[in-house]
Image (cartoon, helix red, strand yellow):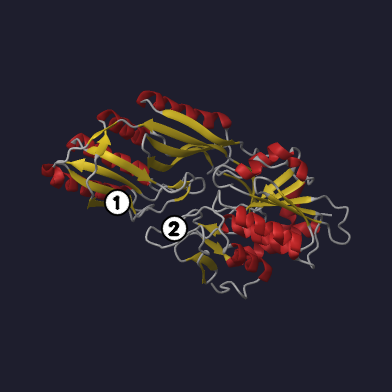
Amino acid sequence: MGDRLAGIQPEAVFRNFEAISRIPRESGNEQQISNYLTQFGKNLGLEVIQEESGNVIIKKPGTKRYEQAPTVILQGHMDMVCVKKEDYPFDFAKDPIPLVVDGDLIKTEGTTLGADNGIAVAMMMAILESDELEHPPLECLFTVSEETGMDGVLHLHPEHLKGKILINLDSEEEGVMLASCAGGVNNVVHIPIDWQDSNGMKQVYTLTIKGLRGGHSGIEIDKNRASAIKLLGRVLKALDQRLNIQIAAVNGGEKMNAIPKMASATILVDEGEVKELEKIVDQYQNIFHKEFEASDPNIQIQLNKGEKVEKVFKNTTKKHLIHALRLLPFGVQTMSANIQGLVESSNNIGTLETKEEEIILSSAVRSSVKSLKDEINDRIGSICELIGAKMELVSDYPAWEYEPNSRIREIMNEVYKELNHKEMKVDAIHAGLECGFLKEKLGDVDMVSIGPNIYNAHTPEESLSISSTQRVFAFLTEVLKRIK
């Protein structure tokens, strides 16, 4: 792969972004990128700490006249969500991300881009290798596994960091300074399977719901985008009521924290019911088009003949599955009464999987209010009680609560007004940032989150604005220059 970003300024930022785009860094598979960053820091002659988790901390002294300035922590995560178009041949474990420059945007040919949060990594690398930028002492923290439960920051050794100012670079909207974020937890529902032999006389079909937009389960949860898993539940309910189908398998989604774009079921029907099956599928195709014509217009329901199966769910398992798909909450649950337009709590059913002994539904529960996060989990727990399922909570992470007084927010607003002749917006986000854990781990740290414009994160349509990255990098380096 050639240097597709060559010539784009600032050269160091985009050179480093392209370099890390060649290295596998899916959540849970970050060893190569962790080693790369460790060697990068050592090659610069800087102090480097590589923690057992894979987190990397690179420390750089302050430049001349900044030796006594307060130490600043710059932070971003090295892992990325790996999602591709259904028909795009690609292996995230070995293939370089296929970068494409399209005007002001950096895109890919059919995969997630990894600008979330690779552009933060690249900006920090550019600052670390610069001999020209003025800045206070820096501690650059690169964490692992942010996208799948924040395991990196959860296992961070706080004694490795001394800074009392922290700039998180995991935001996705230029001109917005985040000062609060939601907490969350992964809610995993286990539905036990009782199997029975299939009826060899029945017809086997694969029912697939596809073509959905998907998206980030925090940032896009209020966009009224459809969930393929929830739509599948509606179709299966109708089919079961009118045809008494059998089900052999259900699967859907790709990542727990991405709105599912695809879901499928292997179903069995009597030969004489095939025409009615096709009729019901057509009816729901029209229903979904009408319901989501503005927010998710390309929904498709496909019905294809399948291979013979030996066993299917018993009726009780089938009923429990359909009840779960229909009743589990999805989407916005409450809106904030304090911050206009802010989602306060939500749930995303990200993946659906059939195993040998159980069906697993994994959800991302988010809320900026802990009691509401608990309330959603309690509702899911009640559903589990009714259908004989088990609920498991994994990777619980805290919210980052708003602090009224912040010197770093003041400095950023001063610089932003000078550069852009308008005030920077201070906001909260309905997504999990590592800032909640960082605040919990580091204690009294003055913290903000910023970043350039990234669009459609966690989808194959993800893109990064070049001009926005240029402005944000100039803004960040000017802010560092002002911290003396």
Amino acid beneath label 2: Lys
The residue sitting at 52% across, 64% down in the picture is: 97
- Residue 229 seen in this snapshot: yes
Mark 2, secondary structure of its residue? loop
Q: Where is residue 206 in the image (x, y as percent from the top left)?
A: 26, 48
Q: Tell me if 451 is positioned left or right of 63 in this view.
A: left
Q: Position of residue 91 (x, y in %)?
A: 47, 59
Amino acid beneath label 1: His
Q: Quadrant of residue 135?
A: bottom right
Q: Residue 84 shows which numbered tag?
A: 2
Name the N-terminal-most of marks 2 and 1: 2
The residue sitting at 34% across, 52% down in the picture is: 210
Q: Which of 162 and 466 is in front in this view?
A: 162
Give the Cα separation between the discs numbered 2 and 1: 24 Å
Residue denoted by label 1: 289
Q: Tell me if 309 is positioned left or right of 28 in this view.
A: left
For marks 2 and 1, give the one nearer the viewer: 2
Split into 4 quadrants, where in the image is the C terminus?
bottom right
Badge 2 density bin: few <14, some 14–19, many ≥20, Cα 10 Å: many
- Residue 347 seen in this snapshot: no
Q: Tell me if 131 is positioned left or right of 456 in this view.
A: right
The residue sitting at 68% across, 68% down in the picture is: 12
Q: Nearer the viewer, residue 2 or 128?
A: 2
Q: Position of residue 325 (x, y in %)?
A: 35, 36
Q: Which residue lies furthest to the left in this view?
A: 272
Q: Residue 226 shows which numbered tag?
A: none
